């Protein structure tokens, strides 16, 4: 089963991805996490990624993003079931995914997580992220056991640099002007399922399990 998660920044894609991947034992592939790791590790690709300014909310180019995904396919990382969190984000990436990443007989479903901007803004303002493993916390509803330290690996928790309010607003604008077209595209292909992401984390996960449960055998 292949699942694609689409939704505005801060809606809870990473949070739900972890729950879904644990429940169905599938791989979590977060393009944001992959790009940030390349930058931290200072790889050749990381230097190229930095030049696009993802810290300021800008997307990297479609050609570089598609190249990274295609390399993962060649490396057999996309052979089994997986969940893509943050890809595709442009129409060109969506077409590349269908034509070059998916195998002919592979099925997929797309979950569109959506809610009002006021909830999203509040979630982002209170988010903490582990600098090492990317685990996600929240100062209002999901505190770590030890202040400032990750429960899973003990590393420091930070505020992501693109969570600054002005940059976050830009990310939202980019989402509605560019990525929302991907939502419409998958809707037209009849593979898109709407998830109301206004509720608490477990209620949203229950909605998702209903959709996946219904289609699990087909996908
Ligand atoms: P990426 O890392 O994917 O960022 P994003 O899409 O902006 O989304 P976020 O990770 O900020 O939010 P989320 O939806 O995962 O929310 P979370 O679960 O953390 O991408 C970063 C950048 O990389 C992009 O801006 C771009 O520059 C680049 N990039 C990535 N992919 C690319 C691509 N394909 N092409 C080009 N460039 C690309 O939750 C947020 C907070 O809310 C947390 O604190 C959480 O605990 C809390 N929370 C979650 N759910 C709830 C709830 N229901 N109620 C209350 N609190 C909640
Ligand atoms: Mg995320």
Image: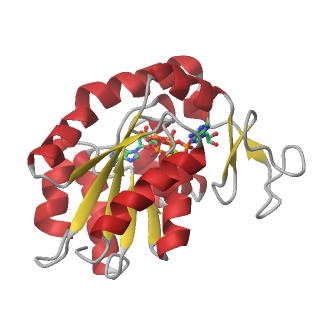
Tag count:
0
Observer-nearest residue: 196 or 89?
196
Q: State the residue at coordinates (51%, 36%).
A: 10
Q: Residue furthest right?
A: 146
Q: Quadrant of residue 122?
A: top right
**Horizontal placement of 214 versus 19: left or right?**
left
Q: State the residue at coordinates (27%, 50%).
A: 88
Observer-nearest residue: 33 or 175?
175
180 vs 195: above or below: above
The colour style of the image is: secondary structure
100 vs 202: above or below: below
Q: Quadrant of the C terminus?
A: bottom left
Q: Position of residue 209 (x, y in %)?
A: 44, 61
Q: Quadrant of the N terminus?
A: bottom left
Q: State the residue at coordinates (60%, 53%).
A: 40
Q: State the residue at coordinates (10%, 64%).
A: 99
Q: Is residue 97 visible?
A: yes
Q: Is residue 36 visible?
A: no
Q: Position of residue 175 (x, y in %)?
A: 33, 31
Observer-nearest residue: 159 or 14?
14
**Horizontal placement of 7 versus 43: left or right?**
left
Q: Position of residue 5 (x, y in %)?
A: 36, 52
């Amino acid at each position: 089963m292949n699942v694609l998660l689409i939704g505005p920044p801060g809606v809870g894609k990473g949070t739900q991805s972890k729950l879904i991947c644990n429940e169905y034992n599938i791989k979590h592939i977060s393009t944001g996490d992959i790009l940030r790791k390349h930058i931290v590790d200072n790889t050749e690709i990381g230097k190229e990624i930095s030049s696009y300014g993802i810290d300021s909310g800008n997307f990297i180019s479609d050609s570089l993003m598609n190249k990274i995904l295609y390399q993962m396919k060649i490396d057999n990382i996309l052979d089994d079931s997986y969940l893509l969190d943050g890809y595709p984000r442009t129409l060109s990436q969506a077409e590349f995914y269908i034509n070059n990443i998916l195998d002919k007989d592979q099925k997929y479903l797309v979950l569109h997580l959506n809610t009002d901007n006021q909830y999203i803004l509040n979630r982002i303002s209170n988010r903490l992220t582990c600098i090492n493993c990317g685990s996600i916390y929240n100062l209002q509803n999901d505190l770590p056991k030890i202040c400032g330290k990750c429960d899973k690996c003990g590393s420091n928790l930070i505020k992501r640099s693109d969570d600054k309010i002005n940059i976050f607003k830009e990310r939202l604008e980019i989402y509605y002007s560019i990525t929302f077209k991907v939502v419409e595209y998958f809707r037209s292909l009849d593979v898109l399922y709407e998830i109301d992401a206004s509720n608490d984390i477990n209620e949203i996960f229950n909605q998702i399990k209903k959709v996946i449960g219904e289609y699990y055998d087909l996908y």
